[in-house]
Image (tube, helix red, strand yellow):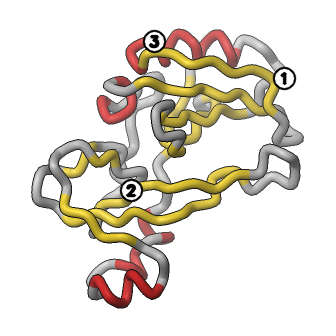
Amino acid sequence: MFQIHPLSAEDFSHLYGLSDEALAERQVQVHISDGGFPCRVSLADAAEGERVFLLNFEHQPGDTPYRSRHAIFVKEGAAEGHPEPGSIPASITSRLLSVRAFDTEHEIIDADVIDGTEAANLISTFFANPKVDYIHLHYARRGCFAAKVTRASS
């Protein structure tokens, strides 16, 4: 069994309510959702007309060649989405994914590109390898980090 994790709402709350100009000073772009902006906090697509932030985020802080940061969307005022263990939100299953399995040293030990509807099967396959510590899901077309996956607590 696995668990999908949202990014912490607290990490972005300092941006809520800021003007477009104040956000631009922080290298944060403001967009109005057309319904297709996947929020990394709520783990849902922002509804049409909602204000979303596009910002750079370090999703892989491990001190290895795989250390990485990239663009993500966060809906203004987003509440954390916490899917049930073993379930994957539609904002993830509806997209082409790059799935990357990491060990405890933050090195990639397996990876694949799949249709999001196949994610649960691949996650289970990767976690069958005891060397896999956690998994990162990325939206394959633009390369953006989607979510972290761990083994579910029993």
**Location of residue 141 in the rendering, given as x and y in whole percent from the top left corner:** 46, 33
Quadrant of image for the C terminus: top right
Kind of residue sitting beneath label 1: Lys
Q: Nearer the viewer, mark 2 or mark 1?
A: 2
Q: Is residue 87 above or below residue 71?
A: above
- Which of pointers 3 and 1 indicates the residue nearer the eye? 3
In the rendered view, does 143 fall on the left or right side of 18? Answer: right
Residue 63's image quarter?
bottom right
Comes first in the chain, label 3 or label 1: 3
The residue indicated by pointer 2 is 73
Name above or below for residue 128 compared with residue 63. above
Which residue is under mark 3? 118
Report the residue at 74% width, 56% height from top. Answer: 61
The amino acid at mark 3 is: Glu
Q: Dot 1 corresponds to which residue?
A: 131
Q: Secondary structure at mark 1?
A: loop
| Marker disc for residue 54 | none
- Mark positioned earlier in the residue sequence (2 or 1): 2
Crowding at label 3, few (<14), some or many (≥20) Cα neighbours within 10 Å? few
